[in-house]
Amino acid sequence: MKQRLSCLLLAGLLGLSLSACAPQGNADPGQSQSAGADGPETLTIAVTKDENTLAPFTYVSSTGLTVNRLVYDTLFTTDTDNNVIPWMVSDDYQVDADSRVYTFSLLPGQKFHDGTPLTAEDVAFSFRYCAGQNVAQLRKIANQIEDIEILEGDTLRFTLKESNINFLRDGLCTMRIISKAIYENEPDGTLVTESVGSGMYRLAEYKPGQYYRLEAVGDYFRGAPRVRVLQMPIIEDPSAVQQSLLSGELAAATSTVGTEVLDAFRSKPGMTVFASAGYSPVMMNINCGRAPMDQSAFREALACAVDVSGIMHTLYGDYCSVGTRGLVRSDLPYAAEGLDYTYDPGRADTLLDTLGYTEKNAVGVRLDESGAPLSFEILVYANNPLRLRMAELISQQLRQVGLDLRVKAMEMDTVDAYVWPDFEVSKGRDYDFAMWGWGSSISPDYLVNLCAGDYESGGDNVCGYRSDAFDAVVDGALREVRNMDQMEDVLRQLQEIVAEDPPLINLGYPDSLQVCNTALYGGWKSMKGGNVVNVFSFLPE
């Protein structure tokens, strides 16, 4: 495990001079010498996890994805309202009526951080290379492509194997563009530790377990970033992050804050709370491949025994949207109606009795057919107090129906290794239950990624969920989709299936509450379903 930053180290790190954090070696003269005149020289922003070198094949969580986007560009991106917009390409891109052929031209003046020009060859290579990499999300994107043609100049034409109306959002907004020269001779992208992207910031220094230092690309094709240096200490302790924000040592953090500290921040001069609807779900994952959780009726009993609404409002008050059995946030346009959870311990008891778990031991825990107690573990990140409390409340409620659930807090990397080994669902899983979350559920493909039994489609299916009905819709009706109305109809069908045959318990969506020091910098932009640490916060006006 990499060294973690202690609170004592934090105090020393935040006091480092810029010269002490200077990158090794000589920077390219045109790459990071200037930034927009209206921003400060340096901002200190906490990163909540060590994300390795931030390269596309080495970062490990949604935090890494957030920071990685500052270093690596994508052909398209989503704006602050979550609308897809062209980024590296001109506005006159074309998508055919069947959503199979995508044609676009690169904007001029784009370069990698080593000074080499970014070309159409690099773009084509980026997609082809990922087809052979052990990153399910990127491999899924690459494997949808039948052909990539480089036309006149820097114009490319992508032809997909099948129609996909979501390819702009879930493919071209996601795939990071990498340098062919750097990766072409290394079959395994995880072995490339050099982080050379084409984004507005370059990785100038990385001290494992301690900090990142990003420097602005002065001749960035969309204009010099408004802040020249982002000093990013790695701080995993949420309390340490909050105290450093209050003290003014941090300008911002990639993490959110809890509702219990909002008044403290709002009363502090120069501090601004950015509150927006959250699209990152918190959930109780269920290992659907392990008995007795492999029984649909047992999972149904769990869903009845947990007071989803009560837990969310206890922990988040009004700053949340309660989850539904359809696993889709209820205000999305394709959310199916009438799929709210119903807290019904009596029905949970009846279902468990029907399954044959009628006998109990001396302390009231139900016994299985062999006489062993129905006792399980729920894994939780040790540094996430809200998820810990959520697990404790779930444990108390399941005990009321005769199930013993023991909360086991562990380091994030350890939990991930049990739930999502090497971030590849095809490698299996080794857990009973886990408190979990995803970076965002705002994409129409989210439900398919989460639940499809074919792991090329269900790259986020960490529960190992299998449903013939669900997969039949994915392999049938979904493949026939040609417009968003059809897509929404299919998504409602899928929601009805998982509501009847639950793969997990979706507790809900905490609002995104991030704190920024607007006295130090006033350019922060809050993104719908995203993070204030984003390209729009640093773009020149």
Image (tube, rainbow, N blue to C red):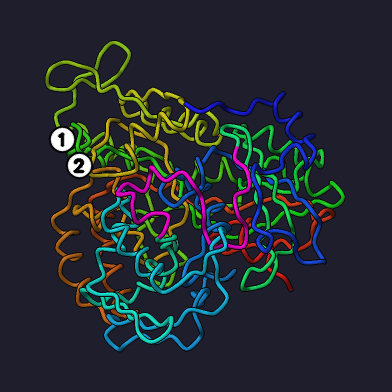
Residue 536 vertical placement versus 412 (above, below): below
**Which label sits in the foreground, 2 or 1?**
2
| Amino acid type of the residue tagged 2 in the rendering | Ala
Which of the 4 image quadrants contains residue 362?
top left
Whether residues under marks 2 and 1 lie with C-beta atoms below 8 angstroms apart, the answer is yes
Q: Which residue is mark 1?
A: 354
Q: In the image, residue 193 lies at what x, y percent?
A: 46, 43
Q: Secondary structure at mark 1?
A: helix
Residue at 87 percent across and 50 percent down: it is 269
204 in the magenta segment? yes
Q: Which span of residues is magenta-colored?
A: 181-206
Magenta segment: does it hold 244? no
Q: Work out whether residue 502 can be spotted.
A: yes
The spot of residue 261 in percent (x, y) is 72, 41
| Left or right relative to 299: residue 520 | right
Instruction: Say which residue label 2 marks.
Output: 297
* Relative to 491, 529 lies left or right: right
